[in-house]
Image (tube, rainbow, N blue to C red):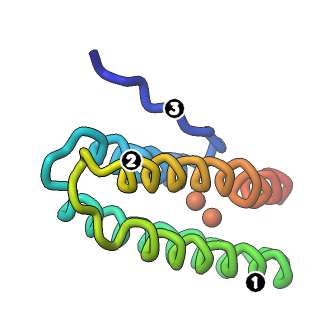
Amino acid sequence: MLEKICFPHLGLQTIDKEHKEIIFFLHQLKGNDNPLKIVRTFVNYFQQHCDHEEELMRELNYPWANYIAHKAEHQKMRDFFALTMSHPEGTDDQKLQDAIEETRSSLIKHINEWDAKLAGWIGLI
Ligand SMILES: [Fe+2]
Ligand SMILES: [Fe+2]
């Protein structure tokens, strides 16, 4: 049975679509016997998504301190993913499964805290 993919919706069409894709990549990693390609795609896609959000913040003149703090959070997450998901050895490996779960929860946390704050601010302008 297909597992339902849950993620927070912010009401920003493009950003929500990208979040859904990112969570979907993680979903695909579970039970996949050759996860390396997906990990690479995930890391690249996540990078593009961060660039996209940062571009949006600059375009909309998001308050500078918030922009810098949000950008720093993106960097922390990229470093974290690079560390935890750089050498997956197979889906039987408990380490990979743990990394996927940790990645998923840190992503959801980031969306709920940082991206929701951005979406709330956009809703006011
Ligand atoms: Fe995001
Ligand atoms: Fe973000």
**Quadrant of the image occupied by residue 24:** top left
Mark 1 = which residue?
Answer: 68
Q: Nearer the viewer, residue 18 or 41?
A: 41
Residue type at the position of mark 1: Ile
Residue type at the position of mark 2: Gln
Q: Look at the image and tell me in which quarter the C terminus lies.
A: bottom right
* Residue at image point 61% right, 47% down: 108
Residue 97 marker = 2
Residue type at the position of mark 3: Cys
Q: Nearer the viewer, mark 1 or mark 3?
A: 3
Q: Secondary structure at mark 3?
A: loop
Check if mark 3's residue and mark 2's residue have beta carbons within 8 Å: no
**Can see residue 55?**
yes
* Residue at image point 45% right, 56% down: 99
Mark 3 = which residue?
Answer: 6
Residue 52 locus on image (x, y percent): 51, 72
* Residue at image point 19% right, 44% down: 32
Q: Quadrant for ligand 1?
A: bottom right
Residue 2 locus on image (x, y percent): 30, 21
Q: Nearer the viewer, residue 123 or 10?
A: 10
* Residue at image point 45% right, 75% down: 83
